[in-house]
Image: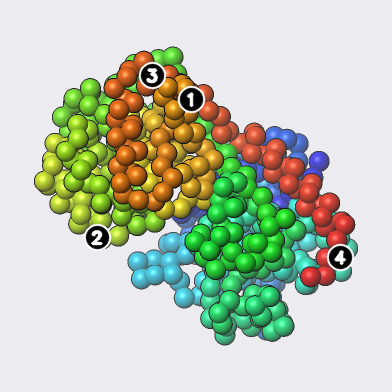
Amino acid sequence: MMNILIVSSEVSPFAKTGGLADFAGSLPIALRQLGHDVRVITPKYNMSDEHSLQLSPVVEHLDVPISNRLETCAVLEGTLGGTVPIYFVQNDTYYHRDHLYGDSQGDYPDNAERFIYFSRSILEICKAVHFVPDILHCYDWQTGLVPVYLRKFYQADPFFEHTAAVFTICDISRQGLFWHYDMHLTGLGWDLFTPDGLEYYGKINLLKGGLLWADILTTVSPTYSRDIQRKEHGHGMEGVLQYRSEDLYGVVNGVDYTDWNPATDPYIAKNYHANTLSRKKSCKKQLLKEFELPTVLSRPVLGMVSHLTAPKGLDLLEDVLDALMKLPLFLILLGTGHEKYHTLFHHFRDTYPEKIGVRFEQTNTLEHKILAGADMLLIPSRYEPCGFRQIYSLKYGTIPIVHAVGGLNDTVKAVHVEKNIGTGITFSKYQADRFLNAIQEGLLAYQDKKSWRALQQRAMAEDFSWSSSAKEHEALYHKAREKFSASDTSR
């Protein structure tokens, strides 16, 4: 058994902006089921209400260094999944806001201070609650300084003499870049503000702290771990990641099938499983009515749930829209994003009101209905660290059409109709004609009902539950401890 501390700036269901929260909210529960003593630490945001979450104070006043002063926080304790203790860092000046990282005006201008403070608090909280971690598992730039503080400030502290650090990159494009005048906030010496340290083109790069000082690095899929070591996907960190390549591992995200399972989903017209796929027609009928489209059930429905931005493949979709509108299909789109794409899809909805349905919003209920009612799900992302929706769509028998990159490549097996293998349609080059060809391949496969049903059943048989992912993380934690024990940790 290990003592494992998960450190994340967002944890579902308490605060969420994306997949990071799902990751940090599910892995601890799965690790707990393997017999480990797992705890979680996250900031106490405005949306995390003490009373409704039944939080209780465990540390009323804790002084944490920031720059040349001390700032006081409190630590509240609740439970995650009914079994895992979760600690909330309460400092209303930093975290009692309506959003996590920014508002309509952009990122909060003090984000460097907010998350440097959060990182600096972690090890002090461990001591205050008397939890000695064997593993500190930190996520993304918001916690990038935790491994640095562990090595630079606490290396000689007997409390942490056996503590190894694991750092997970969920999205290499988000690095926590701030001007160099914020360096004083870290309390670290200027000797670390070099290209071999935290400096990146004259700025502080908080992500680099985790990349350079953690014992083991992970990311959210094997393909993405290789992609980010190349210039086209490394966002300037490819050199650092090549340097740490022997310590870099990719582990596919697990998913929680409690919430995403067509057999039990409360939001869909009829529940179904692999042997009752005919019930999916009721979900398709419900979806078409929801988007005020003709209920022609023989015509395939292509769904897309996404941020409306170019990196999510909206530029490819824009290029093929005219061609798609000439094909016998419905297109349903859900999401928000760049105004350019709002305008574009408004135009196409007005031009083809009986072929395309659009909702410019983010709603969990509609996402469930699209996954159950669509026949295919479009995920043409330019890059994708892992992604959850293609995994959910497999479970719903909704065949994903994906750009074979990152986690999409690791979770969707390319269909070969004649061999009766595969779980989705893939295209390897990020080009509009390749995307259109993949859609046409899907439409052709859809015509053979017997073959299509077999494809759906293969997709639904895939298992990406957390139990497998948790065991892979467990093995990496052992590697981190071995590496820490065997190495001279004075980097």
* SS under mark 3: helix
Q: Mark 3 or mark 1, which has the lower sequence index?
A: 1
**Residues at circles 3 and 4 in contact by the CB criterion of under 8 Å:** no
Residue at image location 64% in from the left, 83% down from the top: 184
> Can residue 311 be seen in the rendering of this structure?
yes
Q: Type of residue at label 2?
A: Lys
Name the residue carrying label 1.
421
Which amino acid type corresponds to the residue marked 4 in the rendered image?
Answer: Asp
Q: Quadrant of the C terminus?
A: bottom right
Residue 340 tag number: 2
If you read the primary sequence from the N terminus, does the residue marked by circle 2 or circle 4 appear first? 2
Distance between mark 2 and mark 4 Cα atoms: 53 Å
Q: To which residue does mark 4 refer?
A: 488
- What is the quadrant of the N terminus in the image? top right
Question: Of residues 132 and 439, which is closer to you in this image?
Answer: 439
The disc, 3 or 2, on the residue closer to the chain's N-terminal end is 2
User: Mark 3: which amino acid?
Assistant: Ser
1 or 4: tag closer to the N-terminus: 1
Q: Secondary structure at mark 2?
A: helix
| Residue topped by disc 3 | 451
Q: Nearer the viewer, mark 1 or mark 2?
A: 1
